Amino acid sequence: VMLLDGAGARASNALERYPYSPIDLQILAKLSGKVPSVAVVVGASAGHSSVGGLLMDFVVMLKDAVMFAAGPPLVEAAMGEVVSKEDLGGAVLHTQISGVAHNVVADEEAAAALVRDYLGYYQTRRVEGAEAGPQDELFHLIPVNLRKPYDIVPVIEQLLDRDSFLQIQPDYGKTMVTGLARLDGHSVAIVANQPAVLAGATDAKGADKAADFITRVSRLGLPVLFLADTPGVMSGSAAERAGTLRSTARMYQAQADMTSSKLHVTLRKSFGFGGFIMAMNPFAGQTATFGLPGVSLGRLPAQGGARAANLDDEAAKRIHETQTSGAWSAADELAFDEIVDPRDLRDRLISAIEMAMNS
């Protein structure tokens, strides 16, 4: 755990003999993936100290803290730009716009509590006394209408152990939800589409957030549960200019490189590459892949895909019927290991994670 409040390298070092030597950044880089690491920015962190923090797995900022490569005086001298510390590198900027930091807290006490919670998910022993809410609530939380948005967070909280979900980077890349939780006392990482934002389509920021999260938690041995409900990768000119294809390819690579256990559930819909980056492909080393009965699947959504392929009305109708016929035909073609009643999903996931822990 690193607490950051420093101005970086000392300018006065240039006035005396200062031989080169191994630096702390080398140590931090070598520790990555071996032990969990946390940086808490408690004041103004500039230059070298901010770079050290960004080598950590989890970066927390106090609401009044700032972090930047160079502070306002250097920026003004080099660039001619006059800017406040907050606008240059405040907590709002880094947790909502740049994505440099993960979570923001009110004060040191809240930071200490968050760090304790975060590190608690990396203990190897199972936490006893796990409880969950009534599983029939999932029926009401996930709408049948594919076009109706809903918040995925209550679904996660209902499915996992009560009060165990810690959302990581909640204010950045909001098309994806990432976090840590427990499933019957076992620590798991969560990667989920967010149908409340852009209908669950994955954009560049969401994919970058998920790719970084998957890489870090997998290297530290946590199993990852993917919850898919997506119409695919975000399209359009703005998405292309943002480099969405590159970011989603990076996310796909991250889940393909995973060395920890991988579980997948399709909750409602999954189309094209948007499903693949959510570990939809059942031959990518998953411990288990599940689908709820009413899911819709396809390479492309039927309406736009049929038009793009210049299909006649009959062919378009058949594609639509196939996509909306539920998960049974997909399971018959080995897309899923099992079609699960929502009320039984938690139990199936517990069995799968226990199988993974013992294999």
Image: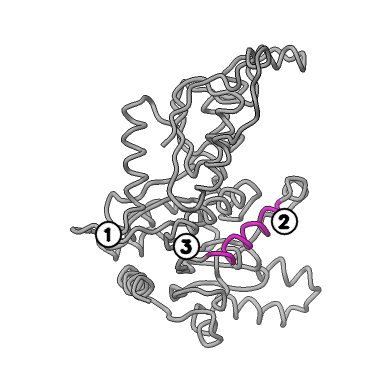
Q: Is residue 348 visible?
A: yes
Q: Give the camera-side residue of 269 and 215.
A: 215
Q: Give the camera-side residue of 93 and 194.
A: 93
Q: Residue at x 54, y 48 (%)?
A: 30
Q: Is residue 22 left or right of residue 78?
A: left
Residue 340, quarter of the rendered image? bottom left
Q: Quadrant of the N terminus?
A: top left
| Dot 1 crowding, Cα within 10 Å, few <14, some 14–19, many 20+ | few
Q: Residue at the left extreme?
A: 129
The amino acid on which the numbered mark 2 sits, given as a three-letter code, is: Leu
Residue 73 within the magenta-colored segment of the rendering: no
Which secondary structure type mostly characterizes the magenta part of the structure?
helix
Q: Residue at x 29, y 64 (%)?
A: 135
The earlier-in-sequence mark between 3 and 1 is 1
* Label annotation for residue 125: 1
Q: Residue at the right extreme?
A: 310
The amino acid on which the numbered mark 3 sits, given as a three-letter code, is: Leu
Of tags 1 and 2, the one toward the viewer is: 1
Q: Which residues are magenta?
A: 244-258
Q: Examine the rendered structure and indicate whether residue 85 appears above or below residue 284.
A: above
Query: Circle 2 is placed at which residue position?
Result: 245
Residue 247 within the magenta-colored segment of the rendering: yes
Query: Circle 3 is placed at which residue position?
Result: 227
Residue 201 rendering spot, x and y as whole percentages: 61, 55
Q: Residue at x 47, y 42 (%)?
A: 58
Residue 24 rendering spot, x and y as whole percentages: 54, 35
Q: Residue at x 72, y 81 (%)?
A: 315
**Mark 3 to mark 1: distance in Å?**
25 Å
Q: Examine the rendered structure and indicate whether residue 160 appears above or below residue 346.
A: above
Residue 287 rendering spot, x and y as whole percentages: 45, 74
| Dot 3 crowding, Cα within 10 Å, few <14, some 14–19, many 20+ | many
The amino acid on which the numbered mark 1 sits, given as a three-letter code, is: Arg
